Amino acid sequence: MRKTKADAERTRDQILDAAEMTFFERGVARSSLDDIARAAGVTRGAVYWHFANKVELFLAMQDRAWLPQEDLCEQLADTPDRDPLATVADVVCDMFRRIATDESQKRVLAILLLRCEYTDEMAEALRRRKEADCSLDARFGALFAAAGGRGLLHPAFTPALAQGAFRALVFGVFRRWLEAPEEMDLTAQGCAMVQAFIRVLGEASSSKAASA
């Protein structure tokens, strides 16, 4: 029987699901198209019908997911003009909560950060991450600069230092959770660390307000 467009889309999704699980379990370098075809329950020819090679398949799998950097940029762009420190804390904690409950998203991010060697052939996948990093740095930079301009930062922190420390904390916590999820509750512990850091950043302004 001739396959319909819907049949082809289901097969494609089936292959992508299998690739996600295989890359997660074996790592990208150690996974072959034969491995993925077996996991998907299709022939190698069916995989090649949809994807020219493993890199194209990897990119399609990545495209189904959202990168945390991209999500944060989008969420921060939609926030009202309020306390910038509270804004970044709320948005990051909301991201933590959503990732913690999305197993597929968690697997893809573990693949991207922990189970892929970014050789020359993977340059396109790395390009998306680098662009997302730059956009997030710009968004964070604007918010911490606004906090500094409004006197909301502790004197020990310049806006640039606060931005760098906060970014290192957020993605350090996130990476640690991906490496050992059984040892950390991303929603509870991760959010607690983010909120504690933001409180430290705002201690100076809180003291001024109390003494005024």
Image (spheres, rainbow, N blue to C red):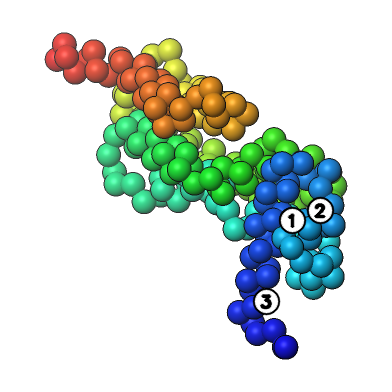
Q: Residue at x 29, y 46 (%)?
A: 80
Q: Amino acid at mark 1?
A: Ala
The image quarter containing residue 56 is bottom right
Q: Earlier in the sequence, mark 2 or mark 3?
A: 3
Q: Looking at the image, which is closer to me, 80 or 124? A: 124
Q: Residue at x 72, y 88 (%)?
A: 2
**Residue bearing the label numbered 2:** 35
Mark 1 or mark 3, whichever is nearer to me: 1
Q: Amino acid at mark 2?
A: Asp
**Residue bearing the label numbered 1:** 39
Is residue 201 shown to the viewer in this render? no
Q: Amino acid at mark 3?
A: Ala
Q: Looking at the image, which is closer to me, 164 or 6? A: 6
Q: Residue at x 24, y 18 (%)?
A: 206
Would you say the residues marked 2 and 1 are in contact, meaning their CB atoms lie under 8 Å apart?
Answer: yes
Quarter of the image with the N terminus in it: bottom right
The Cα atoms of the two marked residues, 2 and 1, are separated by: 6 Å
**Residue bearing the label numbered 3:** 8
The Cα atoms of the two marked residues, 2 and 3, are separated by: 20 Å
Task: Tell me the tag on residue 70.
Answer: none
